[in-house]
Amino acid sequence: MTSFRVLILLCAVSIVPLTQLSANDLPSANPIPMKLVGKMNFAPIVESSGIVRSKLWPDWLWTHNDSGDSARIFAVRKSGTIIKPTWAADNYQGLEIKEAANIDWEDIATDESGNLIIAACGNNSNARRDLAIYVFPEPNATQVIATRTFHRYDFIYPDQLDFPPLDNNYDCEAIFFARGKIYILTKHRADTHTKLYRFDSLDPIGMNVPTMIGEFDVQGRVTGADVSEDGTRLAVLTYRHVWLFKSDRKKDNYFEGSVYWAPLNTLATKNCESLCFWDEDSLLIGNEERELYEIKASDLLELQL
């Protein structure tokens, strides 16, 4: 047995029983009300792939492009207008993360220490061996146009033994921070589930292996996620639905708590790629067309599973 497989097997954990759900279990419901609140009409933002509300500047959102772009982020207001230094040139191109590389950046989060966290782990083919997470201090977008201060943490899944695997369930477009830890949610192609992983520690030199703590059938492919300020509610976005999982402060397997759900108006959202909490009841959803929609968490339906 190769040393790589030994590492994976040693880090494997017992899997929490899957919450069973089928499309027939979902109630008949109208799409959740959605309000168009902004559009990022800024040419360098080509395909907004993740959004998060700033912890240091609460009126700001951070976003970034998908794979194929340079390593840069953008600060925007809820209306979608760009935030930049007054002295920046007319051809301002965003805030550069020097010496980083945008290899399938898919989501962005914030932690409790004023850092931004980028999920550089999009994995459409499920064959990548360079999955990573970037962590760096939130820069002041009104004062700088570049930063090179960051940590990169490489990781592998504890249950992926082949590259690519037969099931193709190791893509990831959702990251969030809660209870002092970074979590990711997978985007599956072999089924409609998602798996929740937690990073119990982060080593900037060695290979990191997150702990799998739960699995849920979200009836689709997860494209974004965020957690409420108090860490008790996890919002999860798919192309067709939005989910909300509520857990108490002692449990980090959000799938074991209360479950709320609503269908999306897919004609309005088109390819929805990102989601974040704006306040305790408001969620923002972004799509590939750079539009921002607002929905209310209180409009979701509680499911009896």
Image: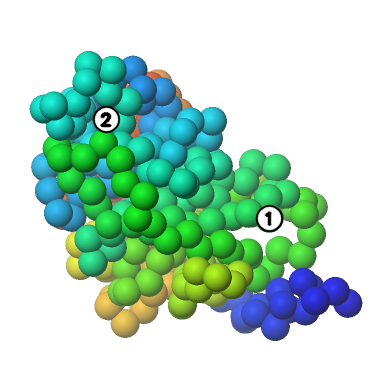
Left or right, 54 with respect to 206, comes to left
Left or right, 223 with respect to 294, comes to right
Which of the numbered marks, if any, corresponds to residue 302?
Answer: none
Discs 2/1, front: 1
The residue under the point 80% across, 76% down is 3
Q: CA distance from mark 2 to mark 1?
A: 33 Å
**Residue 156 point in image, percent of width and height:** 63, 64
Q: Would you name the residue on which mark 1 appears?
A: 129
Q: Quadrant of the N terminus?
A: bottom right
**Residue 171 point in image, percent of width and height:** 60, 49
Describe the element under mark 2 as helix, strand or loop. strand
- What is the three-letter code of the residue carrying label 1? Arg
View extreme (right): residue: 1
The residue under the point 14% across, 37% down is 142
Q: Is residue 151 above or below residue 41?
A: below
The residue under the point 47% across, 72% down is 202
